[in-house]
Image (cartoon, coloured by chain):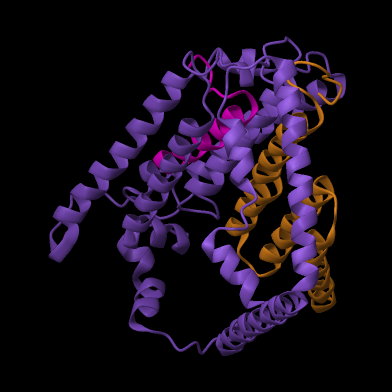
């Protein structure tokens, strides 16, 4: 057991060694690529054989590994169950209320103007949290773009030569009757529902994240049914980046203004409106819309980048 | 009645969570994962948090499953076919 571990530490056992050496040579013909692949797979097979022999010799290491895995799992489960057991029962009235909870429940409607306390919390009391979350989404989209986007720089490399028309990047299900009929009926309804959830975040369950996710899902269904070309007409990379940028900067500036002027008992001059009306809750509605737009762009951007390596027109 | 429904759903939830780890096929694992999200969505409604239920249905059962499926398709292409040769699994 010690031997195997020490050899692994020293770097004697290294499966990747031979693969990385061959994989770097990009400019080869297909036959040569095939040959190389065969060589690599043979090398891997040999390595696996030798490794299985080593492992059979060092059975103790495997047993130790299994026991350690089981023990750590059981410990984790115990800790989690202990925490759950200490939570207050569901629906119980006499929760050990802290100052924060009490204030949220008693003064939430008065201070934020939102009937839905959850929306009041995440977009008013804890708006800074939500700002970070939407920036996390934006960063994730940028990372996926860096990794998967195909532009003129990496289009023509020989490893990625999938340029036949039936390749996944260009292949579209043009006339799928079932998908298209259901798409025609369902997609408008889903869009309307998403907009409703988005605009009523301060009055009913929902809000930015759920509404944006529904809008993004509707766009994905539309793309799956009718192909990328129809979506590219109205949703391009340019539009997506403009919308995301405007939404995020609006959120930052609006909330920054409130943080500067609204704190310490100063008035921030944003009317609260009548609770229950659509135009109520002060800044909650615009912030909801901003978050929802970012989420919708991110959802569709993920799908489009995963499928074909670009958001339309870029 | 609601209690029985809740207990049944929780048992299904645990079953799904274990089954995801034990299925050999990745496609089946994705489908089970999506059904896990659907069951979780019903449980959120029973626990009186409909906003989480909406998000779970849209993200857990919808978008993330679709992203898994797209990734699976790409991986299978690279595994089974040489670049530009056979396209039968499109």
Pinpoint residue B6: horizontal percent, then vertical percent: 78, 73
Q: Which residues lie in the magenta part?
A: A289-314
Q: Judge whether residue A274 can be spotted in this image.
A: no
Is residue A142 shown in magenta?
A: no
A41, above or below B61, in the image:
above
Quarter occupied by residue A66 = bottom right
Pinpoint residue A268: horizontal percent, then vertical percent: 18, 52
Residue at 37% x, 41% y: name it: A286
Pinpoint residue A101: horizontal percent, then vertical percent: 40, 77
Q: Nearer the viewer, residue A178 or A62?
A: A62
The colour with which the image depicts chain A is purple
A240, above or below A15, in the image:
above
> Which quadrant: the N terminus of chain A?
bottom right
Residue at 58% x, 17% y: name it: A27
Pinpoint residue A247: horizontal percent, then vertical percent: 36, 35
Q: Is residue B26 left or right of residue A33?
A: right
Residue at 75% x, 25% y: name it: A35
Q: Nearer the viewer, residue A27 or A93?
A: A27
Quarter occupied by residue A305 = top right
Q: Main secondary structure of the magenta part?
A: helix
| Chain coloured orange in the rendered structure | B
A1, above or below A175, in the image:
below
Q: Judge whether residue A242 can be spotted in this image.
A: yes
Residue at 21% x, 52% y: name it: A258
Q: Is residue B19 left or right of residue A160?
A: right
Q: Nearer the viewer, residue B85 or A304?
A: B85
Q: How many marks?
A: 0
Q: Is residue A104 left or right of residue A219?
A: left
């Amino acid at each position: 057991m010690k031997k195997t571990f020490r050899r692994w530490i020293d770097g004697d056992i290294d499966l990747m060694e031979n693969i990385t050496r061959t994989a770097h040579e990009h400019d080869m013909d297909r036959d040569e690529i095939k040959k190389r692949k065969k060589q690599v797979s043979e090398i891997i097979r040999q390595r696996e054989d030798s490794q299985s022999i080593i492992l059979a010799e060092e059975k103790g290491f495997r047993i130790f590994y299994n026991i350690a895995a089981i023990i750590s799992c059981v410990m984790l489960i115990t800790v989690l169950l202990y925490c759950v057991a200490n939570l207050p029962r569901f629906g119980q009235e006499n929760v050990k209320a802290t100052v924060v909870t009490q204030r949220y429940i008693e003064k939430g409607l008065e201070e934020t103007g939102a009937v839905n306390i959850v929306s009041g919390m995440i977009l008013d009391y804890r708006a800074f949290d939500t700002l970070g979350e939407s920036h996390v989404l934006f960063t994730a989209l940028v990372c996926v773009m860096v990794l998967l986007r195909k532009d003129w720089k990496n289009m023509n490399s020989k490893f990625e030569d999938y340029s036949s028309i039936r390749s996944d990047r260009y292949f579209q299900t043009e006339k799928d009757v079932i998908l298209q009929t259901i798409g025609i009926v369902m997609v408008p309804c889903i869009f309307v529902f998403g907009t409703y959830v988005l605009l009523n975040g301060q009055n009913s369950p929902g809000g930015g994240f759920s509404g944006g996710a529904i809008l993004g899902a509707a766009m994905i269904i539309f793309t799956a049914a009718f192909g990328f070309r129809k979506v590219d007409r109205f949703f391009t990379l340019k539009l997506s980046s403009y919308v995301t940028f405007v939404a995020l900067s609006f959120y930052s500036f609006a909330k920054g203004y409130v943080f500067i002027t609204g704190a310490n008992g100063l008035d921030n001059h944003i009317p609260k409106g009548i609770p229950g009306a659509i135009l109520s809750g002060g800044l909650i509605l615009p912030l909801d819309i901003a978050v929802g737009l970012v989420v919708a762009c991110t959802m569709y951007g993920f799908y489009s980048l995963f499928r074909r390596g670009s958001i339309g027109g870029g | 009645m609601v209690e029985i429904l809740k207990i049944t759903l929780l048992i299904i939830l645990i079953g799904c969570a274990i089954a995801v780890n034990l299925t050999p096929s990745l496609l089946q694992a994705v489908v089970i994962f999506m059904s896990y999200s659907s069951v979780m969505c019903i449980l959120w409604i029973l626990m009186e948090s409909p906003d989480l239920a909406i998000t779970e249905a849209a993200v857990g059962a919808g978008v993330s499953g679709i992203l898994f499926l797209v990734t699976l398709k790409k991986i299978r292409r690279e595994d089974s076919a040489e670049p530009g040769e056979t396209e039968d699994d499109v």
